[in-house]
Image (spheres, rainbow, N blue to C red):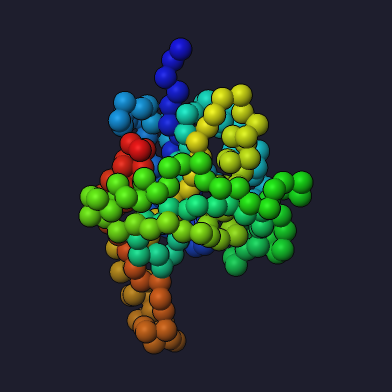
Amino acid sequence: MANRPVLVTGFEPYGGRGRNPAHEAMKQVRGRTIAGKEIVGRGLPVSFSRFPDIAAELIEELNPSSVISLGLWPGESMIRIERIGVNIADFGIPDNDGILAVDEQVDSTGAAALMSTLPVRAIERAVLQEGIPASLSATAGTYLCNICLYSFLQAAQQHHEPVACGFIHVPYLPEQVAELLTAVRDEASVELHQRCDFASMDLDRIVRAVEIAISQ
Ligand code: PCA
């Protein structure tokens, strides 16, 4: 039987940002073989209407042994390994279709929450071992990244073979924070110390953390 690939997904830019480090990290690993595993990469739309179907379709099409999804968490300072997806869709900003979900559910008949089935503690330890800041997180938020995590976990439960699924949030790129700092200075409407979203990590480190996650 052919080896099953690892699916790495990365969200497209959203929220008026020109780049998403998650999408860029996905592009750096796709098409490679890492720890003997073939990596298939897909960009995901920041679109509530495309979930949960897109997750089920990708698992059906690719039959991956595992799915590692990536998204940006603005202001995060480290590799943030999510433990849990919740059945809540409640957005702070509209998605890329202009939809602003308030107090909705991902699936009205679904479980309240689903736990990541990736070896999250092993990933955390291995990433830290390489000197890259990382920690486990008990909330992926209630926006598209949480919807993605929940949807893949649910789709995996329906699949005929086991699929380990999980989500990793990544920080801004340093270049993005430099742009933000420039904008804050130019707008001159809040003091710099009122903002707490200026943490960043370079793309090479983010990609290395994804490689390590794939290898666990
Ligand atoms: N981050 C958002 C959605 C897309 C992304 O990269 C989130 O954390 O939900």
For the residue pair 7 and 212, the one nearer the viewer reads as 212
Q: Quadrant of residue 32?
A: top left
Q: Is residue 84 above or below residue 32?
A: below
Q: Quadrant of residue 52?
A: top right
Residue 46 visible: no
Residue in view at x 49 percent, y 44 percent = 166
Residue in view at x 59 percent, y 58 percent = 143
Point out residue 14 in the picture as x, y percentages from the top left corner. 51, 57
Residue placed furthest toward the top? 1
Point out residue 192 in the picture as x, y percentages from the top left corner. 36, 83
Q: How many marks on residues?
A: 0
Q: Is residue 87 above or below residue 117?
A: below
For the residue pair 142 and 129, the one nearer the viewer reads as 129
Q: Is residue 14 left or right of residue 106?
A: left
Residue in view at x 36 percent, y 45 percent = 122
Q: Is residue 89 left or right of residue 125?
A: right
Point out residue 60 in the picture as x, y percentages from the top left corner. 59, 27
Q: Is residue 109 left or right of residue 206?
A: right
Residue 59 visible: yes
For the residue pair 30 and 165, the one nearer the viewer reads as 165
| Quadrant location, the C terminus | top left
Residue in view at x 56 percent, y 25 percent = 161
For the residue pair 199 and 158, the one nearer the viewer reads as 158
Point out residue 5 in the picture as x, y percentages from the top left corner. 43, 27
